Amino acid sequence: MKALRNYLNKIKPNFEEGGKLHAFRSVFDGFETFLFTPNTTSKSGVHIHDAIDSKRIMTMVVIALMPALLFGMYNVGYQHFLAVGQEAGFFEKFIYGFLAVLPKIIVSYVVGLGIEFVVAQWKKEEIQEGYLVTGLLIPMIVPVECPIWILAIAVAFSVIFAKEVFGGTGMNVFNPALIARAFLFFAYPTKMSGDAVWVSTQSILGIGGGQLVDGYTGATMLGQAATSTGALELINVDGTQASLSDMILGFIPGSIGETSVIAIAIGAIILLWSGIASWRTMFSVFAGGIVMAITFNLFGSEANVMSQLPWFEHLALGGFCFGAVFMATDPVTSARTETGKYIYGFIIGAMAIIIRVLNPGFPEGMMLSILLMNIFAPLIDYIVVQKNITARMKRANLINN
Amino acid sequence: MLTDVFAANVDESKSLRYIDGNVLTGRQIKPNGYLGAHTTSLTVIPEGDNISEFLGFVMPRCNQFSLNHSYFSWLFPKKEYTIDARVKGGERHMIMSGEYDKMFPMDIFPEYLIKAIIAGDIDKMEALGIYEVAPEDFALCEFVDSSKLELQRIVRQGLDMLRKEMC
C-alpha cells in the first residue's frame, strides 16, 4: 500500500494547477480519495472528528442493497428456467441472472459516473459519491428485459436533470433513481410495463433458452390484479398458483431487486442499525400502506379486485418494500425534520396504495407516490419549522410584556 | 515557557497538535506559544497528517471512534481511542438529516439555523433562535457531522453579522 501511496504522491503534481494533466484533476482526486482516506486536518472549530463520512454512508447503503441484488440475480435465472420449463441447478440459475443483470449495472455506473466526473471537473469540486448508490439502485428497479441503450439514456437524463442542474448530491429535489425509472416509464412504456418485460426468455451466452411452457404468463402479480375482472387468482410464470411464501421469499416476476421481502428486510436491518436510514420514515410508510389497504378492504367496491387485496399482499407485492426501505428513506429528498418524517412516510404509503387501487393505468404506485412526496417534503418541513418559530415568538413576547 | 511544560510529557517524534483548551472548542497554539488569560487546560493530540488509510471507507477500521454504528466502536464501549486531528472525509453538502438534532439539547432546529446563516437571512436567523446559541453549542454537531462542515465558524460568522447589523 505504501508503494501505491508513494506513486500517487509522485504523479500528483501533474494534476494540480498548471500540471499537464490538469484536465483530469477530478478523476485523479476521485481515485485518490477512493483509495486513501484524505489526511487533511481540521483548520477551524473542533480538533477531532467522528470517523463517519459520506463515502462510508454510501458504502453502507451499497452493502445493504447486496442481499436484494444477489437474490434478484438468482430470481432472474429462476424465473427464466421456470418459463422455459427446464430443470437447472442453483449456480446455473444464478449465473444466468448474473449475466443478465451485470451489463445493466456496468452501463449505469459508466454513464452516471462519467457525467459526475465531467461535472466535478467543470465545477472544480470533489467528486460526490452519491451516485455510488443511485447507480446500483437504477438497475435494481427496472425490468430485466429493459434494453441497455434505453437504460443509458435514462441514467444520463436523471443525473443531469434530476441532480446536477440542482447542484449535485445533497441539493436535488427528486430521488435521481426514481426519476430515471419515471423517465423510462413514461418515455418507453412498452419496455417498462406490460407482460413481456419481466421475465428474461432468451438464452445468454449459451445458458438457458428454449421453448416457453404452456400456460406461460410474464405478468407481475400486481399487473394480474389490475387487469383481473373476476375472482382474483395470482399465478406464477408457469401457470401454477402463487403462494404467499412465493411472494415473501420473492420467487415472483418483477423489477430485478424488488421481489424478495426477506432480502430487503436484511438490508433494512443494516440501514436501521447503522442509523443511516430513518426508522421514522420506514415505519410510517408501512403504517400508511397498511392503514390504507385495510380501509380499501373494508370500504372498497367489490368489483375492484385490487381493493380486495389483503394488506400483507399489498406490502409483499411490487416495489412497496423496496421503495419504503431504500427510496423513501433517502435523506436528501425526504423530509428532514423528525416530525416531518412521520407525515412524509405515512402519505407515501397511503398514496402508493391509493394509486394501485384507484388508477387502473398504474398497477404500481410506489414510484409516483414517492416522487409526489419529494415535492411536498420541503412544505412539510416548513410547517414543522414554522411551528418552532411561532412558539419562540410567543415566548419572546411573553418575556417582553 | 510552554516548551518546559511539554518537555518529557509528549512524544516529540510524532507530529503533534497543541491546543489551548479542549479538543472541541480550544484554539490551536504553537508548542512555544502563549496561553489566554482564562486557560484552564492544555491538550495535545497527534496531528495524523502522515497517516493514509487504504480504502478507509470500506474497511472495518476498529481503531476509529464513531458514534455511528457503521463502525464497530459500539461493540467496545470501554475501548480507548487515540483520536487525531484528521477531518477523515471531504466537505459535502448536507446529506444526512437529523445528525445535529441528536447532539443539540435546545429546542432549536440546528440544521435550519445553519442554513439560514449560510444564506445570510437575518430575519430567519433571529426567528430560529440564533440569540440562544453560542458557537460552542455546535461543537458536538461539528464532531459528528458526516458532511464535515465547519459549523462553529459558520455560527460565529452569523453572530458577527448580527452584531454588525446592530451597530
Image (cartoon, coloured by chain):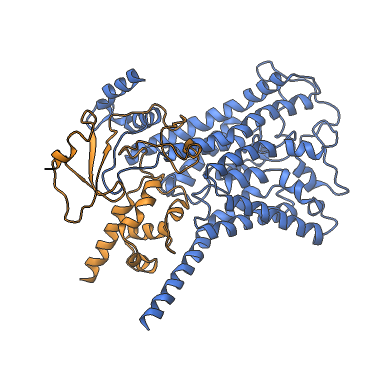
Q: Is residue A95 something that shows in the picture?
A: yes
State the image coordinates of residue A56 (x, y, percent, origin top left): 45, 37
Which hue belongs to chain B?
orange
Q: Residue at x 72, y 21 (%)?
A: A90
Q: Residue at x 23, y 71 (%)?
A: B166
Q: Is residue B108 above or below residue A34?
A: below
State the image coordinates of residue A258 (x, y, percent, origin top left): 66, 38
State the image coordinates of residue A84 (x, y, percent, origin top left): 79, 24
Query: Which quadrant of the figure contains the N terminus of chain B?
Result: top left
Query: Which quadrant of the figure contains the C terminus of chain B?
Result: bottom left
- Identify the image quadrant of residue B44: top left
Q: Residue at x 31, y 33 (%)?
A: A39
**Front residue of B80 and B88:** B80
Q: Is residue B145 above or below residue A236?
A: below
**Front residue of A68 and A203:** A68
Left or right, A280 with respect to B90, comes to right
Q: Is residue A397 above or below residue A300?
A: below
**Front residue of A72 and A393:** A393
Chain in blue on the image: A
